[in-house]
Image: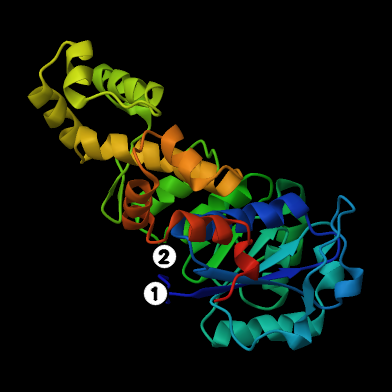
């Protein structure tokens, strides 16, 4: 199932004793994608049958939980987050709501032991679900006609599940890959320090991107190190070539082959990316940040910044201080 909607809605239906790590791990790739897009492409609601009785298994409590009977009528993705004794919370209201979402075309899944709830709702069919291994025996006993998958997560036609722990992040990334191109998935994976980050070169919206440096030839690694060491006082591209002992033409060819951009474009993006982090994370003036990243004037810096990020440094700073879930749509 590929979701084509430009704005995608997720429902996180949580049961009492749900696993907090699994729940937030599943959602974090979508949060990171919003951050990297600079817009709320993915929206989510936390839902519960009774929000006042829904503490996590570690004792933590979510504060922004909607009652199931007040939820919107339709979601693109519905994830059931359960943990201990999921069968004790297979309420008929929850099961009926899930069946309604299924009829309306939602992708529905369960994380940790959420597959039990899908089973009680009659939504397993031929799908082979995943749940935490400690619950395999009880699941097989409860749903003898179902076949358990022993993978860490499973993604099928409008169904998904995972066994818990860090597999929730893997599952979130896999679902995200149905709506994002490989370059964005690679960026999200690297942003989350995911071990399976895609090593392919990136070129996002016409901006030069960098592939993970361990996949690059040594000359390019050294060129990038030189650029990063000279952010405040940039050195010339011919000087970089000379320090590497190669011609400028060869350096240009290598950058285009491996990074799909010129050395000048990559160098500029390194400086702008560092400037963006300073804009978003410090209270330094725009002029101070411009100078710290090798730009001769605030006006020149702001013009290049807006061309690259579609907003001025001042606007980006204001936006970055507001979490995406609280920004105006």
The numbered dot on residue 285 is none
The numbered dot on residue 179 is 2
Above/below status of 48 relative to 31? below
- Pick whichever, 30 or 315, lies toward us: 315
Colouring scheme, one of rainbow, by chain, secondary structure, one colour:
rainbow
For image coordinates 43% across by 73% down, the residue present is: 3
* Horizontal relation, residue 239 to residue 140: left or right: left
Image quadrant in which the C terminus is located: bottom right
- Pick whichever, 121 or 22, lies toward us: 22
Residue that carries the numbered disc 1 in the rendered image: 4
**Residue 141 in picture, x, y percent from top left:** 75, 61
Q: Is residue 263 visible?
A: yes
Above/below status of 104 relative to 123? below
Image quadrant in which the N terminus is located: bottom left
Q: Are marks 2 and 1 in contact (CB under 8 Å)?
A: yes
**Residue 183 in picture, x, y percent from top left:** 35, 50
Above/below status of 238 relative to 176? above
Mark closest to the chain's N terminus, 2 or 1:
1
């Amino acid at each position: 199932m590929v979701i084509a909607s430009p704005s995608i809605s997720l429902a996180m239906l949580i049961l009492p004793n749900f696993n907090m790590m699994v729940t937030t791990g599943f959602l974090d790739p979508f949060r990171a994608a919003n951050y990297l897009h600079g817009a709320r492409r993915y929206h989510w609601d936390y839902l519960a049958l009774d929000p006042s009785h829904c503490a996590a298994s570690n004792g933590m409590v979510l504060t922004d939980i909607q009652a199931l009977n007040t939820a919107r009528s339709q979601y693109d993705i519905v994830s059931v987050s359960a943990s201990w004794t999921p069968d004790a919370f297979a309420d008929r209201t929850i099961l009926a709501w899930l069946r309604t979402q299924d009829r309306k075309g939602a992708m529905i899944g369960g994380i940790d032991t959420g597959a039990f709830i899908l089973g009680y709702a009659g939504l397993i069919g031929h799908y082979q679900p995943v749940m935490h291994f400690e619950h395999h025996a009880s699941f097989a006993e409860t749903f003898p006609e179902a076949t358990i998958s022993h993978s860490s997560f499973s993604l099928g036609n409008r169904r998904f599940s995972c066994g818990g722990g860090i597999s929730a992040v893997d599952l979130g990334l896999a679902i995200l890959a149905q709506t994002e191109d490989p370059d964005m998935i690679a960026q999200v994976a690297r942003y989350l320090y995911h071990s399976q980050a895609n090593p392919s070169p990136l070129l996002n919206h016409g901006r030069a991107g960098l592939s993970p440096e361990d996949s690059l030839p040594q000359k390019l690694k050294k060129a990038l190190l030189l650029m990063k060491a000279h952010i405040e006082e940039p050195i010339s591209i011919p000087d970089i070539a000379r320090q590497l002992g190669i011609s400028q033409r060869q350096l240009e060819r290598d950058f285009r082959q491996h990074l799909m951009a010129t050395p000048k474009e990559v160098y500029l993006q390194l400086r702008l990316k560092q400037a963006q982090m300073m804009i978003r994370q410090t209270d330094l003036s725009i002029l101070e940040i411009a100078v710290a990243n090798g730009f001769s004037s605030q006006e020149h810096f702001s013009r290049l910044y807006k061309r690259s990020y579609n907003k001025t440094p001042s606007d980006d700073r204001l936006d970055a201080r507001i979490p995406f879930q609280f920004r105006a749509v």
